[in-house]
Every structure is written in structure tokens, then in C-alpha cells.
Amino acid sequence: MLLHSRTCQLWQTPLRPGERVCSNSSVLSRHRRLRQPLERLQRAIAAQVYAVPDAASTSQQTTQEHQSSDSNGSSSHSMLGQASNASLLRRVVGTSTAAEALDLLIQQLDRQQRPHAISADDAELLLERALEAGNAGLALSVYQQLCAAKRAQGRSSLATPATVWPAAALQHTQALVMGLCRQLRVNDALATMRSIRSQGMPGADEVSFGQVVSSPLPPQRPLAVVQPQEGCKVVSDSNSRFEFELFSGSVTSCSSEALQLSDNPLLAAARLLGVWRRLPVSAVHEMVVMAPDGTSRTFRIGTATADVPAQLGERVTVVCAPNKGRNKLKRLVLSTSPPGTQPGQPMLICNHKTGIELTLLRPPLPGSQSTVPGWLLPAAVLLAGGDAASGLLDPALPLLIGGGLAVTVGSAVAGNSLLLPRLKQLPGNAVKLDGIRQQLLAQHAGLDSKVKATMQEAAEDVRTLARLCQLQVKMQSVDAGSGAAGSAYEARIGRVVAVARSIEERLGKRLELLDGYARVMNMIEIEVEMDMQVPIAELETLGVELGKLSELESIKEEWQLQAEAQDEVERLLRTSPALPSQ
């Protein structure tokens, strides 16, 4: 096994000649049949991996490209960048939609007898000039056409389209976001960043990847992905080797009741000593969930807090212990449900709208709020009465009865906690393929959390950059209206410009991270949805891509230094004196 030094992901080493994955010949035959399509898939993924430059050379390569484009302004690849087409660029920037701009560009291409293909540099220049001129509507319209071209790039057609916009790239997204921040269009900039994840997808996408649901058993690793059309299914957990039943649907009715916790000193002492680890039930919820196929199921669940798991109309997934007869192996004696659970017992609920997962507790019986087991008091009375009665016959008899009872209880507890779970577990070969899929889902969940964190940090940078641009405009307007020979805010404007430039560089790196995360998540979703039953060694290219992303994440130390400089500028702006009187 190989452990990646940065991503801390576990990858299985390739098989040596003569080794076998398992003894099941049918699985081996499926692996051999999938060898050829996997080789084609690896070549396609490797082409994407090697096409992406590393983090150390990205900025240098971008600088060299800009320098070469500036020096070769009259090259045939850039049409709008030529000095002779300055009037054309002004007319194109003055249009209101991408269709009008495209008509002007087609006319120029026809005059030059060039194919109807717009270069990526021309599209980037058009975005920058449109935003500098304050025409944000044109920039957003052009960017939509670039995203549509990226979606249509992978489609095969017999006839070549008459006019081709370039596919949306990272440079176009960076140019649009930076320009929108300078124009104080914060909401549009945030919407553009959120669209990075869905670039190349149809606008009305109703076939989403689904919701990743975790296992109710610790350490709560990803169990399965629930798609919108799914209702009830049985899934095996490769970590614990138990089976769970997932019931998904919309909440049609829900009622909740808060319970008052009883101050029982016996239970408090047991929890303090670690003997009683079950959490107290704070609220009981009753809900009816209807699956997409029309079947409904009622759940009575308990939660450790008074928070309501879901509202009416929200889609949820309840992870339960399998009902009788729903196991895949159809065992007659021992079921594959987790130990200590009853058939159909809810164990975890996942809200698809909020993404919150709650571990469920066994609710008390209706009309009873006592957390003390009902068998505890009768057992104590029976044991005390038996000791008193046997003490009359023989003084040593109570000790023998107590010792025998302790041995019996200890053996029963050991059998239920050690032996019985081992017997109920699935064999290792039966969950091997599920384990590969769940490891991919774990990678997907980890990247999804990183995307949310990076998106939140990038949103803060967008708001800060827009505020700095607004401050710069205010100070420049005050200097222009004062009529004085010297500039009262010249030094502060220089500081604001320097900090804004550093924030733009940091925001560009974060957009690059988001683009890399989105690409790897799409690769993982492809493998999961194609449901290829292959060893994890066939997917090592995903580890290479994650390694490239970890190099980008190492730049965060430099971002901290830039954040300190930004805080210093904000402190100077807060402590600035009043405006000079005109």
C-alpha cells in the first residue's frame, strides 16, 4: 500500500505478475474485460494531468504568454489585440449582448478571409475591455457563451459550426471576477465563482450527481451516493462489513415533541464513570417520508438536541438497519444488520437541502420519559430478595449465586459484543468492490469540504477587493474636487493599490484551486457513475491530480503574509484623520 505524503490518501499498489485480487473467477474475468476501456480512460486522464502546469510554473508561464502576446500584437492568433483593430474593439465593447458583438467580429473575419473562430486571447481581451468600459452586461453575456462552448466542445457533429466561441478557461473566469470586483458587482462575482463547479453542464441540469450519505457507525465514512430518483436500497459498508437500508424521499408530515431531561443521580454517576454511554433523548420526532415511487414510511426518531431534522417538503435519507428479508445474502440465522439494532431501526438522517447529518437515538416509549431501563428495578429487587432468602439456608449461598450471575452476565456481554458481531459480518470479498466505490466517495467528500472552505475565503477576498476599489475611487474623487496642486491621499491611494494587487493575486490562486477541485471531483463522479468494478490501482491518476492540488495549497503561507499587510492598511484607513476642508 502507498500513502501519499501530502494528501494522506491510501492507494493500492499495482498487482505483480501472478498475484490475484480474490479467488472469485467471475470478478477476475470482469477485471480482464475492463482492461481495454480502462487503458483508454487512463490515457485521457493523463492527458488532462500533464496538460495542467504545476503551481510553481503557472504564474511564470502566464507572464511569458502575456509578454509574447504583447510583443506579437500583430500575430494572426489575436485579432482584437492588433493596433489596426482599435476601432473595431471600441465598437464591439459598445454592444449590449454577445450576439451583437459576434456579428461585428464575423464581419471583420470575413474581410480578412479567416475562419469563423475567435481565439481565447480575443475573448479575454473583450471581457477586460468591456468591464473597463462599465459594460458588465456584455461581459456576462460573453462569458455565458464561453461556458456554452465548453459544454459543446465534447459533442461530436458531422458539420462544423459556422462560428465557434472558445471554451471557457481559467483565464476568462479570473478576468471576469477581477473586473466585476472593480465594478463593485459583488453578487455577480460570487455567482461566477459558484458556476466554476458546473462549467460545461447544461443550464437546466436536473440529473445531479446525488447526495453522499455517511455511515452511522464511527468513524462515519461515506457509505453511498443517493440520486434524486432513488427511493429504497440496501448498501454494504466496507469498513464495518454490515448492511444498511437507505430510504430516501420527501417529508410529507412531521411533528416534534421536546422532552424534559430527568435529573437521575444514578444515570449521572454511570455516565461519569463511563458505564452508561448512551446520550439522553432531548426530542422525539415523528415524520412520514414518501419515496419517488410513491411508497411511504413512518419514522419515530429521537435526537440528542431539540433541533428539527427536516421541514415539510425537504428531501431526506434515513439510514436504517435492514428489515427482515432485505439482506443481500438472504441469511436465515444471522442477519447482516449492525449489532444491537432492531430491524428497521433508524440510525442516521441526512437532509439533502442543508447537507446536515444527525445521528439518531432510540426514542422512549410513548407516554414514558424515563431513561432508566425497565428491567433494572425488577432485577435489583429479585436479586436482593434471592440473597435474603438464600442467606437463611446457607450464609455462603448468596456469594455463590452472585458469582454465578456475574459470570453469566459477563459471558453474555462478551458474546454479544465480541463474538456475535464477528459472525454477523459480511465476508471480505463481498464488500471489496463496495470498498473501492466508498473510497472514491471519501475523496469526493474531502474535496467538497475543501471547495466550501476555499469558496468562503474567496468570497471574503471579493468583498474586500470591492471595498478597496470603492475607497480608491472615493479618495481620487476627493482629490479631484479639491482643486489643490498636491494630492492629500496620494500615499494612501498607493497603499490601497498595493494591497488590492496582492488580493487579486491571492484571489487568482484560489480560483485556480477551485478549478482544480472541480476537475478532480468530476473525474471521481465519472468513475462512480460508470460503476466500473476495478481495483483501486487502476485509479492512481487521481492521486497524481490530488498531488498537484496539494502544491497549490502550500501557497497559503504566502497568503497569510499578504493578509497581515491588508490588516495594516485597514488599520491606517480606520485611524485616518478627517477630510481637509475645501
Image: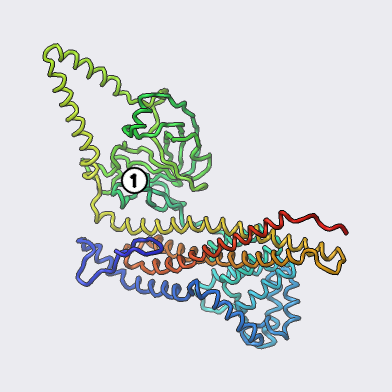
Residue ID at (77%, 64%): 489
Q: Nearer the viewer, residue 542 or 266?
A: 266
The mark total stands at 1
Residue ID at (46%, 66%): 549
* Image quadrant where residue 403 sits: top left
Query: What crowding class fits label 1: few (fewer than 14 Cα within 10 Å), some (14-19), or many (20 or more)?
Result: many
Which x, y percent locates residue 222? 39, 52
Is 520 located above or below residue 293 in the figure?
A: below
The residue type indicated by label 1 comes to Phe
Q: Nearer the viewer, residue 194 or 320?
A: 194
Which x, y percent locates residue 205? 53, 59
Residue ID at (31%, 47%): 243
Which x, y percent locates residue 27? 25, 62
| Colour mapping used in the image | rainbow
Q: Nearer the viewer, residue 63 or 487?
A: 487
Q: Is residue 85 visible?
A: yes
Q: Is residue 228 left or right of residue 560?
A: left
Is 39 located above or below residue 192 in the figure?
A: below
Q: Is residue 296 left or right of residue 470?
A: left
* Image quadrant where residue 174 sits: bottom right
Screen quadrant of the N terminus: bottom left
Q: Secondary structure at mark 1?
A: strand
Which x, y percent locates residue 49? 44, 73
Residue named by callout 1 = 244
* Image quadrant where residue 151 sits: bottom right
Q: Is residue 191 visible?
A: no
Q: Is residue 128 left or right of residue 12?
A: right
